[in-house]
Amino acid sequence: MIFSPFCDGDDASTSTSTSATLLPPDDPLRAMLHNEVHARPSARLRLPALIFYVAVLNTGVTREQEREHLSRLPGQQDLPQDSLHGNFLRLRLEGCNVTWERHTEFTRYSIVQTLPAAALLGALEPALRSALVVTPDWLRGLPGRTVAAIQLAMTPGDLSDERALMEQAQAWFGGRTVVASKLGDEHSWALTEFRIGADGFERMLVIAPAATSETRVGRIAQRLLELETYRLMALRGLPVAKQLAPMLAESEDALADITARLEQKAASDQQLLDTLVSLAARVERATAEHVYRFSATRAYSALVGQRIAELREKAIPGTQTIGVFMQRRLSPAIATVAATAQRLASLSERVSRTSALLRTRVDIATEVQNQQLLEKLTRGQEMQLRLQSTVEGLSIAAISYYVVSLLLYIGKALKVAGVPINPEISVGALIPLVLWGVWSTTRRIHKKLRADP
């Protein structure tokens, strides 16, 4: 059976028809964003309760695979194809409820059933695995890889005698050291040992008065389970940070060496450029591969702090609170991840600055080369201009010679024709005029060429 996350009084059709007549058209995301508040409703649990909780990484796991696995539960053979369209589904089976929740990186499965009488407060390290209602094969076959597995027992108890209650709780954990807190206005106790047992599960115990409301019990369970899940997801950035440490140290040394060689001009620009490009590619690859993991660690760490604050813990004499225990062990790991992320970002910025310095040096060298080339071109143009002036002078003389020769022939022809003229004297007198005419014509041609674009 599929449970609706909405209250019985919700009337979606009335709301839709009203908005259709009284309001402008809905934004396409309005309904989805509005209903997000109901996407994962809190469970209502009745004491005593036992929750088998498993969170698995869903990378490479499709919703259809998860739906097919859920359909193997008794009575769920006809589970609709679109039943996992959202991110939450609660199924009621005989003797238990099974809840499915899909998140970005992991999927959570919660099996809620009644806590057996043999596992109530006062029992000595009770065996909980045998009480599982669903088959072990179904639980073992969940698609994905386990990231968190918790057995959360929630039992009624008298909170007035703290010493006796602590003795019973420690006996329930087999006499081992536990971490414990009073929650809220001391309405309940939460205890755990933060250890994975032989069956692969952590154990948590919640003790509350028998009259505790079902909604409060549900909220306590949700916060504790989310707290442990987000803690483990936040810690997934720690192995990545440790793995990157040698590469970062090597890259920082390499960058320092490049900067020193750049300052001392101990290598050619091409050698420095090749080394710097290789280093930049290595850093950018590490950034692209791990920036999401570091961002996710920050987000999960913030959620851990939020869930701890929501518990409103008070200390039980002689024990650490869950929040103090977790933060003292979680904070160094989160700080290491944050420092590695900052170190990687800083290295990327330093590589960019070094690249800018090298680019500036290359640009300056290029400018010098261009300037030298321009100087050579200028000298060549000056020589060409002087040569051109010399050639023009010779050209004026040659043209004048041909013009004078032509005039001499004309004078001789006129003399033969009977004209009283002395060709040699006449042409000799015209030589200055010819020279001036040829020179002035050449000047006019130069002016015209300069005036044309």
Image (spheres, rainbow, N blue to C red):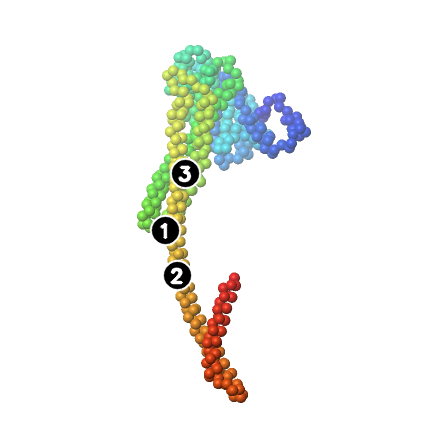
Of tags 3 and 2, the one toward the viewer is: 2
Q: Residue at 42% x, 11% y: name it.
A: 161
Looking at the rendered structure, the secondary structure element under dot 1 is helix
- The image shows residue 199, relative to residue 357, as above or below, that is above
Q: Is residue 228 visible?
A: no
The residue that label 2 is drawn on is 376
Residue lying furthest right: 21
Of tags 2 and 1, the one toward the viewer is: 2
Residue 283 position in % (x across, y down): 40, 42
Residue 401 position in % (x across, y down): 46, 78
Q: Residue at 61% x, 33% y: name it.
A: 27
Compare marks 3 and 2 and give the one earlier in the sequence: 3
Q: What type is the residue that disc 1 sits on?
A: Asp
Q: Is residue 74 left or right of residue 16?
A: left
Residue 282 position in % (x across, y down): 40, 43
The residue that label 1 is drawn on is 269
- The image shows residue 75, relative to residue 156, as above or below, that is below
- Badge 2, how many Cα within 10 Å: few under 14, some, many 20+? few
In front of the other: 363 or 440: 440
The residue that label 3 is drawn on is 345
Q: What type is the residue that disc 3 sits on?
A: Ala
